[in-house]
Amino acid sequence: MVTPLWMVNRSVMSVRVGVGRRPARPYPRSVTVTVEVASQATPELVEAFGRLLPQLSRSAAPLDADALARILGHDANTLFVARAADGTIVGTLTLVMVPIPSGLRARIEDVVVDEAARGQGVGTALTQAAIDAARRAGARTLDLTSRPDRDAAGRLYERLGFRQRDSRLYRYAEQ
């Protein structure tokens, strides 16, 4: 089950933007996108992640209903889904908010838009929904990372007000 944003904040975020750049898309050249907050690990959501997650990461393990339920059930996470006019889930974004001694911090993770729906405003709608939710929650900052080869994503984030920071990013991973 997904909870439409209007049930959360009394306003549905629907955006009609974008002109497709790829000729063979199953979605119209301009698409109406509705962003919702997912609340249950439905078969539809499991299927959507089965289709979308490989477009984000070749190394990410597939998610089953139990894995999605754990993600959805974690207090720090808000999972946004974007639907095309026909109801198909065409993108997802996870907003993680964590209270730490210096204040509430928010982070955008795992943004993925179906290849067939890219360039049509889906990423903009998802990111704006996350910005609005973080702002309503009182987050002091909202951070994200994006691989350098994702030029379109970088332009989108800068257009929405994100700025690159001089920072060292470290990662510890078990070998």
Image (cartoon, grey):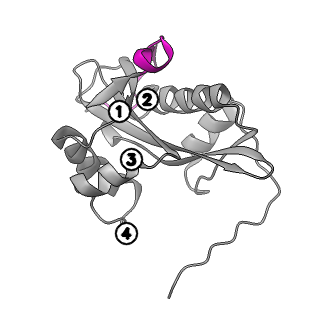
Q: State the residue position of label 2.
A: 122
Q: Dots 1 and 2: beta carbons under 8 Å?
A: yes
Q: Which secondary structure lies at badge 1? A: helix
State how many labels appear.
4
Callout 3 secondary element: helix
Q: Which residue is mark 1?
A: 117
Judged by depth in the image, the label closer to the viewer, 1 or 4, is 4
Q: Amino acid at mark 4?
A: Ser
Measured in 3D between alpha carbons, the distance from the residue under mark 1 to the one under mark 2, in whole angstroms, is 7 Å
Mark 3 and mark 4 lie on one chain; the one further toward the N terminus is: 4
Q: Of label 1 and label 2, which has the lower sequence position?
A: 1
Residue named by callout 3 = 73
Between 144 and 37, the residue placed more toward the observer is: 37
Q: Is residue 97 left or right of residue 138?
A: left
Residue 67 image offset from top left, x and y in percent: 30, 57
Q: Position of residue 8 (x, y in %)?
A: 46, 20
Whether residue 175 is situated above or below residue 16 in the rendered picture = below
Residue 116 seen in render: yes
Q: Decide: marks 2, 4 in contact (CB < 8 A)?
A: no
Q: Position of residue 21 (x, y in %)?
A: 41, 30
Range of magenta residues: 5-23
Amino acid type, residue under disc 2 in the picture: Val
Going from the N terminus, do you reach mark 2 or mark 3 first? 3
Verify whether residue 16 appears in magenta: yes
